Amino acid sequence: MEPVRKYLSLVFIFVILHTTLFAIDSDAMKEGKKAFSKKAYGEAIKKFTKHADSHPQDGEAYMYLGYIYEYKKDYPKSIQNFRRAADLDLDKDQRKTVLLKLALFFNYHQDWNLSATYASRYLKYDSKNEEVQKIYNRAVGNKGNPSSTHSYSHPTKVESKPSEPKQSEVKKETSKKQEEVSESSEGTKPSEYYEQVLANQPHLEDVRWDYVLALFEEKKYDLAETNLKNLIEKNPSRSRYHYKLGIVKLRQDDPKSAIESFERAKKNPFSKDTNVFLYYVYLNEGIAFQKLAEIDKAETSFQQAYKQLPKDPPLLALARLYEQKSDWENCITSADKALSLNPNQVESHMFRFVCMFEAGKRTKKFETSFAKYSEFIDSKFPDLTQTPEKYQVGFIKLARRYTETNAFDKAETYFSVLEKVPANLESREYLFYRGRNYFYSGKVDLAISILQKLSGSSSGYYLLARCYSRKGDISKTKEQFKLAADLKPEYWTAENLEKDFKEVWKDSSFREFIQTKAGTVSAQNQ
């Protein structure tokens, strides 16, 4: 009887293994891999999705989808699929690769909870990997757990089945955004949970810290501030508490108090990865100084952040600062350095494009940044009014560039957005270049209506004179030409006079007007 039972067990095992292998090697999976090898990613996505639908426990299809979206630079979808793969069936090597990718990604984006989760799961397979051990240690330290020993241990809570990505995750790009740093809410329980624990055990410092993190994620900043002050009172040398209070103050739009907290944090910096800690302190301190319009101090803080860690966020912050100061050369240099570290950072391309435009440097880098910036706006924001304000810094330059390349309708879409900002309606740059776009697109009356609002501009008066010339209005052509030449006498002898004023040049009175400089010299002398 025993041999029969063993035989039946072997047959059962064979059937299960055969079914599993067949499922993994389905026709859809085979076709997906074939399309993947040929880089036919659209077809591969369809096949892997089909396989995943019919084999919900197989993680291999999701792993391949993660690779495809990574190649397509759609990082949110890539990570979403890698996370699904990590919780499903994979062989050991595949699982290690996926877990490593996730640990590195969340480490780079400072999502310490998820970075620790995936690093610890990887270390189950390769506990001697020193780089992943460092990632795990850093993640635990940055999460602010005071009881952390900074060494690997099996986590008591492993991430559950993946959920749909949050809006904040979807908006993440390949590079770090220059913004306040905060811990992820994923892995942190709702604040009500900690309130119940603290009601019975108010002395638990690490629980109160997690409570602060939960409050911060829930945007309950006043309550987070109260509990942080409680923690600081009990442990005034704890640098993390001062740093987090500074971030809370920034969110409360109190940059002066934020700076005071950052200064306290710097006096006793975090002992593990001190440069990483100081990097964030200086970076956010620079933001606080910038909000106070203390530009020189902001510049120093951003430079100090870069000194701690040579990353692109402080360089991007400096580029933004220099653009505001109209320091075009330093803006270009900072954006250049940022792009050497992160070639696809759109804001860096935007600032380099804007400042090279202002500096008159039409090099290959200028064209590259224009292409990257304009393509990003076109693909992400078909409705320009929905473009985040931070990406609108270069809109006026995009409009000008499209005018230069005779894409007049395209330029007008940007001018239409810019006109909704009241300050632009008084901007000489906006008025002149929108009038110029109308002029060259043949909308002379609209050009006149815009250019008439511009005063004290020789170029504006000259362009307005050309508008009236096209309409054959000799009197107003002379009037505007004289205003232009009074500011810039070179117009009297400009080489393009005859071409620019083709419609009125045939009139002898206009030629005499030019020859005598509006009657101020004799024609013979001229």
Image: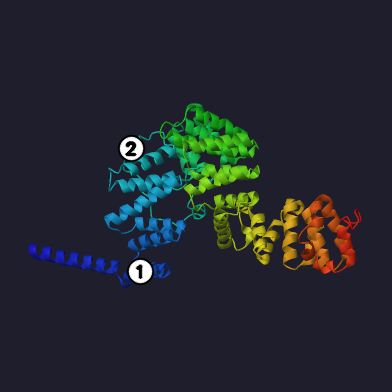
Q: Is tag 2's residue or tag 1's residue first in the polypeptide sequence? A: 1
Residue 164: quadrant of the picture: bottom left
Mark yes or no: residue 446 visible.
no
Residue, disc 1:
32
Image location (x, y in percent) of residue 150 = 36, 36
Mark yes or no: residue 110 visible.
yes
Q: Which mark is residue 228?
A: none
Asked if residue 255 is positioned above or below residue 414 in the image, the reply reads: above
Badge 2 element: loop
In the figure, is residue 383 to the left or right of 280?
right
- The residues tagged by marks 2 and 1 sit, at their Cα atoms, a distance apart of 41 Å
In the figure, is residue 196 to the left or right of 124?
right
Looking at the image, which residue is at 32% across and 40% down?
Answer: 152
Count the labels in the image. Answer: 2
Badge 1 element: helix
Q: Look at the image and name its color scheme.
A: rainbow
Dots 2, 1 in contact, CB < 8 A: no
Image location (x, y in percent) of residue 433 = 72, 57
Image location (x, y in percent) of residue 74 = 46, 59
Residue, disc 2:
151
Question: Which-is-in-front pick, marks 2 and 1?
Answer: 1
**Is 431 or 78 nearer to us in this picture?**
431
The amino acid marked with disc number 2 is: Ser
Q: Could you classify mark 2 by the number of other residues whose Cα lies within 10 Å: few (under 14), some (14-19), or many (20 or more)?
A: few
Looking at the image, which residue is at 86% across and 63% down?
Answer: 511
Image location (x, y in percent) of residue 465 = 82, 61
Residue 69: quadrant of the picture: bottom left
Looking at the image, which residue is at 62% across and 62% down?
Answer: 383
Looking at the image, which residue is at 42% across and 50% down?
Answer: 105
Asked if residue 199 is positioned above or below residue 25 in the image, the reply reads: above
Asked if residue 503 is positioned above or below residue 398 in the image, the reply reads: below
The amino acid marked with disc number 1 is: Gly
